[in-house]
Image (cartoon, grey):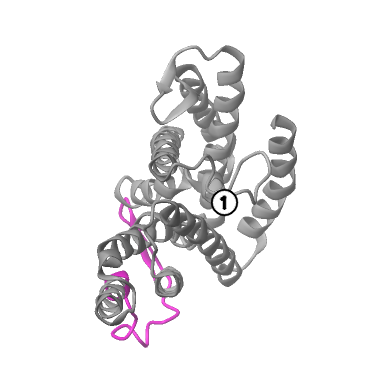
Amino acid sequence: MTWKRVVTAALLIPIVVALVLYASAAVVALAIALVVLLALLEFFRMGDAIGHRAYRVWTCASALALIFVQFLAGQDQVTQVSGNVTLHRHFAHLPSVLPSIGDVFFIFIIGVALLTLWTRRPMVEALPAAGISSSALLLIAFPLTYAIRIRAIASDGPALLLFALVIIWVSDSVAYFAGRAFGKHPLAPHLSPKKTWEGSVAGFIGSLLVAFIFRPWLNASLPLLLGMAAAGNIAGQVGDLVESAYKRSAGVKDSGGLLPGHGGVLVGIDALLLAFRVIWYYFILVGVR
């Protein structure tokens, strides 16, 4: 399994890096849309395993709407950090008609209500269907859309998005190999028996080292980058464990098999579910200027 894991990473990472650094914002948004849809399908399959059938089409359509709204917000966003303001007003002539994330969630809720009332499904499925659909949109699609917002942050966006990805990649890899080499104390045996405290700490240190490497490419002080790496790492490890909890709840070993050596797409991006949002808010609230 280890060689499959390495080969898969070696093939995918250069593609992702090229997209992040050189592709336009629209292409990045389309790539994220593809990842979100694949992850949602895997999440739906886990729901199916316990008899919770989602409103798949409506949830996927709402996820795409979220991505579109985040793309518009990225093009029109005002980033204010430590007193410095950078404006992107591509849609300044339409400020009152731009949809918001809240609008998408409201429309999603209306759609779920209508589907619940008019579907031909047995009524016993109404609550599970609403629950798994809402969970998929809120816990999977919504967090991943913040990659679009990070990418749109002034001139630092591409490098900052790559930084967010690399701290997770390094953490996962270091934790995996360190845990196999000398891990003895289980981190969360009821969720993921193979994860150890030794691997977790090694992964955390690996993320901090990434901050030193990225310092020349980001307009940020080293302490702030270290804080961002630490916050992103902790969020990533929590996201990883939460995804393990989902699998345990569904009684499945992997969410899918699209990524050899890693499992499904959802397993490959589980740490990013919380990391993207944490890094976004860290940037907005703490500032990296």
Quadrant hosting residue 189: top left
Q: Nearer the viewer, residue 60 or 157?
A: 60
Query: Magenta stretch containing residue 101, yes or no?
Result: yes
Graded by Cα atoms within 10 Å as few (under 14), some (14 to 19) or many (20 or more), the crowding at tag 1 reads: many
- Residue 285 drawn above or below residue 133: above
Q: Horizontal and vertical percent for residue 53?
A: 39, 63
Q: Quadrant of the N terminus?
A: top right
Q: Is residue 35 visible?
A: yes
Q: Residue at x 30, y 54 (%)?
A: 83
- Residue 122 drawn above or below residue 186: below
Q: Residue at x 52, y 52 (%)?
A: 161
Start-end of magenta stretch: 77-104
Q: Which residue is mark 1?
A: 265
Quadrant hosting residue 101: bottom left
Give the amino acid type for the residue marked by disc 1 in the picture. Answer: Val
Q: Horizontal and vertical percent for residue 225?
A: 45, 37
Q: Nearer the viewer, residue 213 or 115?
A: 115
Query: Magenta stretch containing residue 33, yes or no?
Result: no
SS label for mark 1? helix
Q: Nearer the viewer, residue 120 or 197?
A: 120
